[in-house]
Amino acid sequence: MSPKEPPIFNEMLNGAEIRPGYQSLEKWYRSMPAELRSLKQSEAEALFRRVGITFAVYGEGGDPERLIPFDMFPRVLTNAEWRKMDRGIRQRAAALNAFLADVYDRREIIRAGRIPEHLVTNNEAYEKAVVGFRPPRGVFSHIVGIDLVRTGPDQFYVLEDNCRTPSGVSYMLQNREIMMRMFPQLFLENRIAPVDGYAGLLKKTLASVAPAKCDHEPNIVILTPGQFNSAYYEHSFLADLMGVELVEGQDLFVEGDYVWMKTTEGPKKVDVIYRRIDDAFIDPLCFRPESMLGVPGLMNVYRSGGVTICSAPGAGVADDKAVYTYVPEMVRFYLGEEPVLENVPTWQCAKADDRKYVLEHLEDLVVKEVHGSGGYGMLVGPKSDKSTIEAFAARIRHNPDNYIAQPTLALSACPTFVEEGIAPRHVDLRPYCLVGETIELVPGGLTRVALKEGSLVVNSSQGGGVKDTWVLAE
Amino acid sequence: MLSRTANHLYWMSRYLERAETTTRLLEVGARNALLPNVNGGYRNDWEAVLQAKGALEPFREKYGEPNQRNIETFLFFDADNPSSVYSCLSAARENARVVRTALTSPVWDALNTAYQELKQLQRTERSKLMVSDLTEWTMRSCHLVRGSIAATQLRNDGYNFMGIGTSLERADNTSRLIDVKYYVLLPSVSYVGSGLDQSQWALLLQSMTAQRAFNWSYTGEITASKIAHLLILNRKFPRSLAACVQWTCEYLDNIAENYHKETEAQAVAHQLFDDLSNASVEDIFDEGLHEFLARFMTRNAQLATTVHNVYLSGLPV
Amino acid sequence: MILNVRHVTRYLFDEPVRGIVQSQKLWPASCASQRVLSWAVTSEGCMRGAGFTDSAGDRVELASWRGPVSEIEIEVTGQVETIDLFGVLRDHREKVPPSAYLRATRSVAPDKGLRALSDEALGGMDSASDLDRAHALCRAVSAAIAYRPGETEAHTTAAEALAGGAGVCQDHAHALIAVAHVAGIPARYVTGYLQSDGAGASHEASHAWAELHVPTLGWVGFDPANACCPDERYIRLGSGGDAQEAAPIRGMVQGAVPVEQLVVEVVVTAGQQQQQ
């Protein structure tokens, strides 16, 4: 990385020229009076609040029903841009699942020396309890969220993979819904690929991985930690869209060979559980004994083939930041293909050479905790002062295995409404790939935007906002 | 339907109804305070109102001597008082929020708006709030939610569990309101039939918005026995015990029909209804109004327990 | 050697509970050092199901009771033929790679004391064989923690037991796992039965020890409580990362947490093969 600030790719403007796909939006913006804009903005906010879509910021206290800021200026991807991403995402989701099926079975990739054993089997997310178990269709991660960033016209990088229970898809759906309600004209002027098939595809995916023993229309449920979870709205939204029950651990019990839910008509068998609870909490008899969120005995029923848990316990070993480095290798190893999407170059502090480089270039790098998420516990070198950097260096020296570093990418920027009009703000993209009998992907994803000028942190927990994401039809 | 969902819907309705009762009690108390004392001057019956809610002790601990302002605060805004309008509406909304997707938007909007307005009221300077405004606002809000339920909810099992919550709670609350009048406001039997007695009966009618219902249903002067008939046995009056129990029966019958399964809850409810249908005002006064009401409340509570065991616990009994 | 086992676990609740669910790991697997001749797990009034062989090769079943229940009893009876293989676990079918047993749980998390014990035990043994190193660790744990019941609790960690200098077989096994981890040796907790004396004294019969992974031999059992390797007096029941993971019974009681009384009777006797 050169210490010089690299140029930022503006997704709408190429100098004075407007890029394809943005022409009508540019006109739309120019012809919108300021009063109308603020009117629409508050209308959007009221709509979000009406439907109840709110986001509680973890650990920050305050209003648990806080709104995540919605930016009305859509982000546009041309069909050609999306086609490449689509191919790359499906490829990556397939490789990640092949990896999981392998490391919980024969561990060929380790035997072949393509990934160090300790990174996998000695990983906190590697779950002994599922070794040797093949879930229905061999799928471990049924919903794969892949975070993408862009640095140039054709440069897309995968920032991280989310193989457990990626959240945010409700925003993808609601952002579109609200834009269509407020600006129907835009959808007549542009041919925008719809995203509303997501819930149907999710249900189809979950049904396709029902246990072999299930000989009827599978009973699917979403398992939530409860109404105090920050993503509770999303859980209930998805349950409603799919027409399945939203359950808490207390609604389920195991007996005999199956999991049952408590209904007003008595116990009803459950076949597929889309759980939005971490591994550690799903079964106190197998994992954390003090957990009240899970279902005692669930893992026994799972292992004996009575129920499918999505994602499979242990799926997290594939989205660990240290394992991330090896995903391109997985694509080559399992699929015999070259990766369509590149990784961000990553230095592993566990390796002496890499560590040396990282410690010498901290002011240019982003350093992340291997198991961290949500933008916590990370260092953004160029935005940090000397004492912060020094303190972080000490942490790296103390526990190098816990950190990886990446260059501070010049994330692309999209026009975003600000006080004075519009201004470019950095964005990323999280598409949601569904893996069951088939691999499915709706065109688009959740665009997160760093609303603060110059900020690179798009996490909603740290002041990021969201945008509707358009994939233009051909 | 998930037992927990049914349970939340059921309790949403119960809390909504309870908020309304608290506000009706507040009104009884406020109006009663305006009635002349038998010894001349004006009575302070606030203690009686609190006692009816079983809340006299907690109130004394927190506020000391009852006066109107404190009691208004306690019954309306106090989050520490589990039966204050604020507590009940918050609990109703919280139960609704958890099962948001089982409710139509108008129902949720009505309940959520009530809650937001209540928080607004809480911030309003107290000298600008009249008791009558508060009670009117509460009743209007409750009517709006129930109206939205009636107008928009699918007639499925969820609807019936909401109905059972309302009818069970209302039966209990009507009994309590009558009991306040008869047992607490008028501790001495010697007052029965006195002028004060009459005006308190009239007040009771008023607190249940039942004056017109009374006038249309009965002729001649207002007597205790006619009022007791209206509030306890008259199935045409929507707050009477008989009407409430009849609804509970109907909702339970609907559920049984939906599920193709008769249950013990139905049997218990119908037995209670039959017993009420066969009773007369004379029987009730012979037994003693208070004793009758106490017995009814116990049986109504047992019915609630049976409903819980059969439907809301999720396990077959 | 033929060993007969009778193991009864009884739970008594002072108030009836709404229900009980247990994950039971009560079936020994046959391997080179033990052959299961007969084995039965019985309990009244429970529903069984969801049986499977777990990743570590142990049979697991689910048992559940619908309330109200105020007493349950689980009876294990069986006969196993054993031979002395000096602790070596051979022909045991399992799927988990040994490298997955290098992670510390709370119970076996190493602290300063455990690190020092490990380093001390292996001082000057850099060129020693892996097996000798494992033996040295076992000896060190035996010497550092005296066998004394009543000094520790079920949730006592290895670090706490070492600091206290006394404990029972669970503490010994935890400490050995911890010092093995420090030395980079995969290690795990094993539960089983031990026939002590001819009398079959009840209190040591339900036993626990550790297995350390030695590349040339595979998993090898070490019993630091008795300063030896498991021999023909031992029956291996199941394993896990620590006592909690390996527990023969992991259960949950539904409803208000009642006062629970646990009664365990275990008898292991040497005997004749049953007449079929």
Image (tube, grey):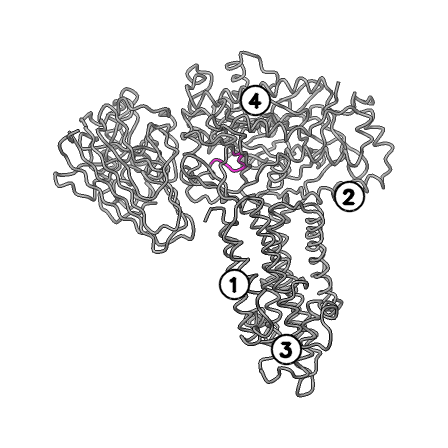
Mark 2 neighbour class, 10 Å CA radius: few under 14, some 14 to 19, many 20 or more: few
Residue A412, position in %: x, y?
70, 26
How far across and how far down the image is residue B78, in percent?
62, 64
Q: Amino acid at mark 3?
A: Asp
Chain of the residue that carries numbered disc 1 in the rendered image: B
Can residue B81 be seen in this snapshot?
A: no
Q: Earlier in the sequence, mark 4 or mark 2?
A: 2
Q: Which residue is mark 1?
A: B299
Which residue is painted at 69% across and 18% down in the image?
A154
Q: Upstream in the sequence, badge 3 or badge 1?
A: 3
Q: Which mark is residue A460?
A: none
Q: Residue furthest bottom?
A: B39
Q: Residue furthest top?
A: A336
Mark 4 or mark 3, which is nearer to you? 3
Q: Nearer the viewer, residue A178 or A394?
A: A178
Q: Which residues are magenta?
A: A273-279
User: CA–CA distance between discs 1 and 2?
Assistant: 52 Å
| Residue position marked by numbered label 3 in the rendering | B45
Amino acid marked by disc 4: Ala
Q: Nearer the viewer, mark 2 or mark 3?
A: 3
Q: Dot 4 falls on which chain?
A: A
- Camera-side residue of A20 and B90: B90
Which residue sits furthest front? B278
